[in-house]
Image: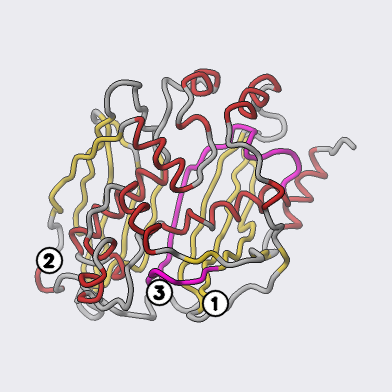
């Protein structure tokens, strides 16, 4: 049956605010935390050493801030497949923005459920913007994280990908595992605590040790093809533009590109290394400005920079602005992190 443009919009708008959840929980493994930290080039000892994690106030090994991608991103992809007519994720969409609110730190052994919903949709000049919301809940601890992912697509009347391209994608993506995938089920929206209500600094550095305008020492990080392929396996990202030159060229890209969540997850590790403990983060957000192209036989070099923009003495919190660039070209835009100092 052919669906009209107006029917498509009506179907999408009818789905906004409806919550679905994963049927089974995702149990966070200790070794998975280490694998994920390695994929993000994150050497923070709270991800590797249980004793160091305990010293920072955690009962088990602490997970990196963006570990939500391991299960939440898959649930969000299922949501888009369910509520958006057509194959949205094969239509040429790009991730343009990511935002997190952290309520409680995720540690080894947590049993997580992902509640997903379409948060907003709009069509501008023939293009479409979709924002999906994911709420991560532990079966015992309640809400742990919220995240919002905004995707931009060509829309029904835009220049989508050709049938030949989609066929090529199918031939290089992961082998199908749909028979093992449990459908999402309708759910009630979880009750969300106030951001920062946990108000724990954990192992963060003292508030008196930082100052407004202070620049955080920059970090240079190399990303190779091996890093991209490793992240594909660790995070389960099926998009072949991260490993196939043929697909990247067909998508009119200069080369394969690093995953946005790989570069942002590495940025989060860069910031948490300065702050002292990822669990001290309250919010993190970024817009993706340009792709990080990774050549076949050399590394792409990303420079991360940050500074403390504003301090709030009454709460001992600070707002950090950060960015990343490749050869002087910005990778992120409008990036901020709100943290709780000790």
Are dots 3 and 2 in contact, CB under 8 Å? no
Q: Residue 210: which numbered mark, if any?
A: 2
Residue drawn at (28%, 70%) of the image: 280
Quarter of the image with the N terminus in it: top right
Of tags 3 and 2, the one toward the viewer is 3
Residue farthest toward the left in the current orientation of the protein: 209
Determine if residue 105 is in view. yes
Q: In the image, 318: left or right of 72?
A: left
Q: In the image, 334: left or right of 192?
A: left
State the extent of the magenta-drawn residues as a range: 84-112
Q: Quadrant of residue 58?
A: bottom left
Of tags 2 and 1, the one toward the viewer is 1
Residue drawn at (22%, 54%) of the image: 43
Residue farthest toward the front in the current orientation of the protein: 31
Q: Quadrant of residue 337?
A: bottom left
Q: Secondary structure at mark 2?
A: loop
Instruction: State the residue position of label 1.
Output: 139
What colouring does the structure picture have? Answer: secondary structure
Could you tell which of marks 3 and 1 lies nearer the N-terminus? 3
Are dots 2 and 1 in contact, CB under 8 Å? no
Q: Residue 104: which numbered mark, if any?
A: 3
């Amino acid at each position: 049956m052919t669906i009209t443009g107006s029917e498509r919009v009506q179907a999408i708008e009818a789905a906004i605010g409806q919550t679905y959840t994963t049927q089974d929980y995702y149990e966070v493994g200790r070794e998975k935390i280490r694998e994920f930290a390695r994929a993000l080039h994150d050497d923070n000892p709270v991800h590797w050493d249980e004793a160091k994690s305990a010293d920072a106030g955690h009962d088990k090994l602490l997970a990196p801030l963006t570990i939500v991608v391991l299960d939440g991103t898959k649930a969000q992809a299922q949501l888009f497949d369910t509520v958006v007519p057509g194959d949205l994720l094969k239509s040429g969409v790009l991730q343009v923005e990511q935002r997190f609110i952290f309520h409680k730190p995720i540690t080894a052994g947590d049993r997580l459920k992902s509640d997903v919903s379409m948060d907003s949709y709009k069509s501008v000049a023939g293009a479409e913007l979709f924002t999906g919301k994911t709420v991560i809940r532990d079966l015992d601890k309640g809400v742990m994280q919220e995240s919002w992912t905004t995707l931009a697509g060509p829309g029904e009347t835009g220049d989508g990908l050709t049938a030949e391209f989609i066929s090529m994608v199918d031939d290089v993506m992961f082998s199908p595992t749909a028979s093992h995938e449990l459908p999402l089920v309708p759910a009630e929206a979880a009750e969300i605590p106030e951001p920062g209500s946990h108000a724990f600094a954990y192992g963060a550095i003292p508030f008196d040790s930082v100052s407004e305008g202070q620049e955080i020492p920059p970090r240079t990080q190399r990303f190779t093809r091996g890093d991209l392929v490793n992240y594909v396996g660790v995070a389960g990202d099926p998009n072949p533009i991260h490993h196939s030159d043929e697909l990247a060229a067909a998508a009119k890209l200069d080369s394969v590109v690093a995953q946005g969540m790989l570069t942002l997850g590495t940025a989060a590790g860069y910031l948490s290394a300065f702050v002292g403990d990822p669990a001290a983060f309250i919010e993190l957000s970024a817009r993706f400005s340009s792709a990080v192209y990774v050549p076949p036989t050399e590394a792409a070099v990303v420079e991360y920079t940050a500074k403390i923009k504003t301090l709030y003495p009454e709460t001992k919190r600070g707002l950090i602005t950060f960015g990343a660039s490749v050869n002087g070209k910005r990778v992120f835009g409008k990036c901020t992190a709100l943290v709780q100092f000790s």
